[in-house]
Amino acid sequence: MTTRPRVSSAVEYGNAASFWVEYPSGLVDVTRTVHLKQGPLENGDVAQSQAAEAAPTPPLKPQLQLEVPVDGDRVVRLAKQHTALIVIDMQNFFLHPDLRDHTTGLACVEPLMKIVPALRTQGIKTLWVNWGLTDHELTTIPPSLVRGFMKGGKGGFGAQLPGDFGRLLMRGEYNSALYGPLQALYEEGKGLGTDVWIHKNRISGLWGYQTALDLYLQENGITTLFFAGVNADQCVLGTLVDAYFRGYDCIVVRDAIATTSPTGGLENVLYNSGNTYGFLTDSRKIIAATQSSF
């Protein structure tokens, strides 16, 4: 992965309302709280081209902010109240061994079982974004998506699956439930008020304005998103790219995303997550950051 050189002096990106500030130390502040000073500085330089010492780094506010190391020799400072973990499609239909062989997807369970509780200690919510269709929505899904979930022109959304798994990706069915211990983890968080279940009806959870996820993020002032789930180059990528297009801060959790696609699918997502869409980190770095914040 290509590593961007550190900036030689503090740089502000964005606009008056939505902005980041990057410092020569490697810190990228996405809290949108402290603008760089504008105009001439005391040492004669001008803002945005000043010497590093002319733009001191604002002190961390541990009760409100968290600093998470990311790839590329950077640290992202985020606002806890405005941050959420987005977990996509960790459902029985995609992970249960009785329905498919997804060993890399199953390997994402353990990291999630650790980072979800860790982020809860910081007041950061987890949004479980999952397929969950209604009978009405079956009549609104575009043909390309319908065909993609069928095999040989049979099955597809709403079709009856073997055993007790129910109708394919319909709300309330067992195949649409979270896999294994993740369902209990969600139920625990629901009771604590830290976890939210959000239905989606497209590959992306943000495919159009006014989706359930879009409304939740706007109504709760969330601007920074951690991404996890399956499949990395399909539903995770779709939601990630739409979030990036809309100006959200995107941080992908490397060991908590996976795909069944051939070699190259996951690598492409990881490469672009760290070089274009935002940042790349892992569960170990997140957990260490939450432990050091107390």
Image (cartoon, grey):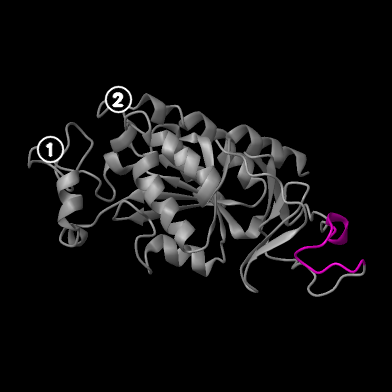
* Amino acid bearing label 1: Lys
The residue pinned by badge 2 equals: 101
- Lateral position of residue 169 relative to residue 91, left or right: left
Magenta part of the protein: which range? 43-56
Which of the two residues, 16 or 9, is positioned nearer the viewer here? 9
Give the residue drawn at x 41%, y 50%.
129
Q: Position of residue 45 (x, y in %)?
A: 85, 67
Q: Position of residue 153 (x, y in %)?
A: 7, 42
- Lateral position of residue 9 relative to residue 269, left or right: right
- Label 1: state its secondary structure: loop
* Amino acid bearing label 2: Asp
Give the residue drawn at x 27%, y 28%.
100
Let me know if residue 101 is in the magenta part.
no
As displayed, is residue 257 above or below residue 142? above
At label 1, counting other C-alpha atoms closer than 10 Å, the crowd grade (few under 14, some 14-19, many 20 or more) is few
Q: CA distance from mark 1 to mark 2?
A: 17 Å
The residue pinned by badge 1 equals: 151
